[in-house]
Image (tube, rainbow, N blue to C red):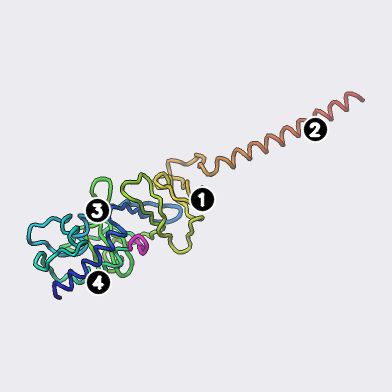
């Protein structure tokens, strides 16, 4: 494959990376509606190089490489390629929309000697690998591979995906929900809910009990409990008034 062709594909995907992922945190919630976990990912300018698979040969750093890609300032002589580069480029457009097309999450099974990654997010055609870096998982590899072939079974279903700018404290954009789940029916544990500020999410999503919370009243149920208590008190007062009236009548007789 000619380096000029590779370069044109890298330029296209650099623009998509800038529009969709650069400077973003993406939170993937996965599991089931009753047992949900999550990972938070981080996409910076320096991570784009890992996704292309090319190797720089002139001492240029990953950040400068990305910056020059955005301005069409890379020479074919600036990088080397191997047999994996075409495979990565074929699926890179899907990777740029991973926040919309991720279906499953799993732990890397370790069966590929030359591959080092930890968590994998993807679907049946593309997989994006992540490694832990501080508080977040960062992308470090792209595979033209069914995620079920590179992760430990059983894989976890991606239930919802949220996105925000790294400058924002909370996630404000709901990008994806799994089939059968809507914005209104989404249920998430408190450990995820406290990270969200998404308009239009119902209060029902704000509490999914953990083992440590058994016996506690979920915040979404508190108002219902107050209303029930008031209704019971009103019924009790009504009964008491009725009894007092009956007693007074009997005494007057």
Q: Is residue 103 magenta?
A: yes
Whether pointer 1 and pointer 4 mark residues with C-beta atoms closer than 8 Å, the reply is: no
Badge 3 element: loop
Label 2 vs 3, first from the N-terminus: 3
Badge 4 element: helix
How far apart in space, not on screen, are marks 4 and 2 (Cα)? 79 Å
Label 4 vs 2, first from the N-terminus: 4
Q: Which residues are magenta?
A: 97-104
Q: Nearer the viewer, residue 15 or 208?
A: 15
Looking at the figure, which quarter contains the C terminus?
top right
Q: Which mark is residue 44?
A: 3
Q: Position of residue 47 (x, y in %)?
A: 21, 56
Where is mark 2, residue-wise?
Answer: 242
- Depth check, mark 2 against mark 3: the one in front is 3
Q: Nearer the viewer, residue 202 or 179?
A: 202
How far apart in space, not on screen, are marks 3 and 4 (Cα)? 22 Å
How far apart in space, not on screen, are marks 1 and 4 (Cα)? 39 Å
- Depth check, mark 3 against mark 4: the one in front is 3
Q: Residue at x 35, y 53 (%)?
A: 27
Q: Position of residue 56 (x, y in %)?
A: 11, 61
Badge 2 element: helix
Q: Nearer the viewer, residue 54 or 31?
A: 54
Q: Position of residue 93 (x, y in %)?
A: 29, 67
Q: Residue at x 19, y 57 (%)?
A: 67
Label 3 vs 4, first from the N-terminus: 3
Where is mark 4, residue-wise?
Answer: 90
Is residue 5 shown above or below 39?
below
Where is mark 1, residue-wise?
Answer: 202
């Amino acid at each position: 494959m000619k380096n000029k062709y590779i370069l044109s594909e890298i330029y296209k995907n650099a623009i998509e990376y800038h529009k969709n992922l650069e400077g973003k945190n993406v939170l993937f919630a996965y599991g089931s509606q009753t047992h949900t976990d999550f990972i938070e990912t981080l996409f910076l300018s320096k991570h784009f190089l890992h996704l292309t698979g090319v190797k720089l040969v002139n001492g240029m750093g990953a950040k400068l490489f990305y910056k020059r890609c955005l301005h069409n300032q890379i020479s074919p002589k600036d990088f080397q390629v191997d047999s994996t580069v075409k495979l990565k480029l074929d699926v890179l457009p899907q990777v740029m929309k991973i926040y919309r097309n991720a279906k499953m999450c799993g732990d890397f099974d370790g069966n590929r000697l030359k591959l080092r990654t930890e968590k994998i997010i993807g679907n049946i055609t593309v997989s994006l690998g992540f490694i832990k870096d501080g508080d977040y998982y960062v992308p470090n590899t792209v595979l033209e591979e069914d995620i079920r072939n590179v992760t430990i079974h059983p894989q976890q279903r991606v239930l919802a995906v949220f996105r925000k700018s790294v400058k924002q404290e909370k996630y404000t954009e709901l990008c994806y929900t799994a089939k059968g789940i809507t914005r209104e029916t989404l249920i998430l544990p408190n450990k995820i809910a406290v990270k969200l500020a998404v308009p239009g999410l119902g209060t029902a999503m704000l509490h999914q009990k953990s083992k440590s919370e058994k016996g506690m009243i979920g915040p979404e149920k508190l108002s219902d409990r107050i209303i029930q208590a008031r209704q019971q008190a009103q019924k009790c007062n009504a009964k008491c008034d009725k009894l007092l009236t009956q007693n007074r009548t009997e005494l007057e007789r």
